[in-house]
Amino acid sequence: VTGTWMGSITIPCTYVPSEGFTQETLSWSVERDSSISTIIRRDDSGDHILLSKFRGRVSIPKQSPGNASLLIENLEMPDSAHYTCQVIWRSTDNSLITREVTTTVKVREVNPPSSSWELPSSLHHP
């Protein structure tokens, strides 16, 4: 997924809710320079943002079963990284099921300098 510096981006993570399975926890982690940190975790007590540099910039849809996508606003260049969505469900027999998906995010600068913005010489005034 590619985003633009200072813009916003949604990293998709969706599933089809099925009967007999309750979402226990949902977490998003970020891997950059071979270290992994949890950004946000949702459990029974609400949403917990664990990485201060994402505070006020990330959210997960509420009242939207099956949609665990992560919205990041005010993108910064260091947000380019691998993001993993992990969902844990509890089944009726109390066993836990875990699924995760990883997405690579690239943040690019707005309008990288390009020579194509130059006017053709024929349009220049004498």
Image: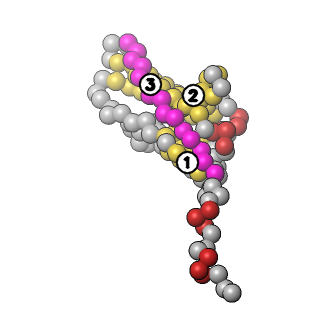
Identified at 54% across, 32% down, the residue is: 83
Q: Secondary structure at mark 3?
A: strand
The mark found on residue 29 in the picture is 2
Identify the residue shown where x is 40% and y is 15%. 96
Nearer to us in this view, 88 or 73? 73
For label 3, the residue is: 100
Mark 3 touches mark 1? (CB < 8 Å): no
Q: Quadrant of residue 17?
A: top left
Where residue 23 appears, as percent x and y from the top left, is 42, 27
Segment tinted magenta in the rendering: 95-110
Q: Is residue 22 visible?
A: yes
The residue under label 1 is: 3
Q: Quadrant of the C terminus?
A: bottom right
SS label for mark 2: strand
Q: Residues within 10 Å of mark 1 (few under 14, many from 20)?
A: many
Disc 2 residue type (three-letter): Ser
The answer to which of marks 3 and 1 sits earlier in the sequence is: 1
